[in-house]
Image (cartoon, rainbow, N blue to C red):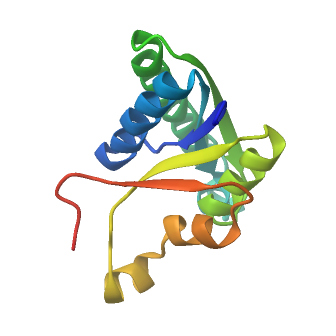
Amino acid sequence: MYKRILVPTDGSDTATCGLREAIKLAKDQSAQIRIIHIVDELVMGSSPAYGVVMDNIVDDLLAAGKSILESARAMAQDAGITVDTQLVEAFGGRAGEHVVKAAQGWPADIIVCGTHGRRGLRRIVLGSDAEYLIRRSPVPILLVRAVGAET
């Protein structure tokens, strides 16, 4: 049985599909959900020449992340699920790495996440956090393909 379900989100429709499936699983298993959002500050903080401007951008990214988490929390709470959230402030690395660390640290019984279903060159160029999770996760992964995802 799954009692602790980790759900990474970036606020996209694809991530929301994963959250909806996690909510169904949580209801079925009488489980709790932890929703995480990762803000990578390395992308924004790489040039000291921009100083204050970059600080403002990071602050905006953190505020947006909090908003994404609050919306996701409300969706799970409205469904009667016990839920908490975690905003991960990262400084580099793949999102998948931070998800794996969160799964180990909590500890999660399963990770449920949406996937775009990219294939071929687009997957290689854009990377695949879902593939990273499949290869590195210490717990089972449930990938939820978004409606209308690429084939």
Please tell me which residue is depicted at 23% across the width and 62% down the height of the picture. Answer: 149
User: Which of the 4 image quarters holds residue 92?
Assistant: bottom right
Please tell me which residue is depicted at 42% across the width and 76% down the height of the picture. Answer: 126
- Looking at the image, residue 13 sits to the left or right of residue 69; the answer is left
Q: Is residue 67 visible?
A: no
Q: Position of residue 98 (x, y in %)?
A: 70, 54
Quadrant placement of the N terminus: top right
Q: Residue furthest right?
A: 105
- Looking at the image, residue 145 sits to the left or right of residue 4; the answer is left
Q: Nearer the viewer, residue 133 or 1?
A: 1
Q: Position of residue 66 (x, y in %)?
A: 54, 27
In the image, residue 83 sits, relative to residue 21, either above or below, namely above
Please tell me which residue is depicted at 53% across the width and 65% down the height of the picture. Answer: 129
Q: Is residue 2 visible?
A: yes
Q: Nearer the viewer, residue 121 or 113?
A: 113
Q: How many marks?
A: 0
Quadrant placement of the C terminus: bottom left
Q: Residue furthest bottom?
A: 121
- Looking at the image, residue 80 sits to the left or right of residue 120; the answer is right
In the image, residue 142 sits, relative to residue 85, either above or below, namely below
Please tell me which residue is depicted at 34% across the width and 89% down the height of the picture. Answer: 121
Q: Position of residue 75 (x, y in %)?
A: 40, 20
Q: Residue furthest left?
A: 148
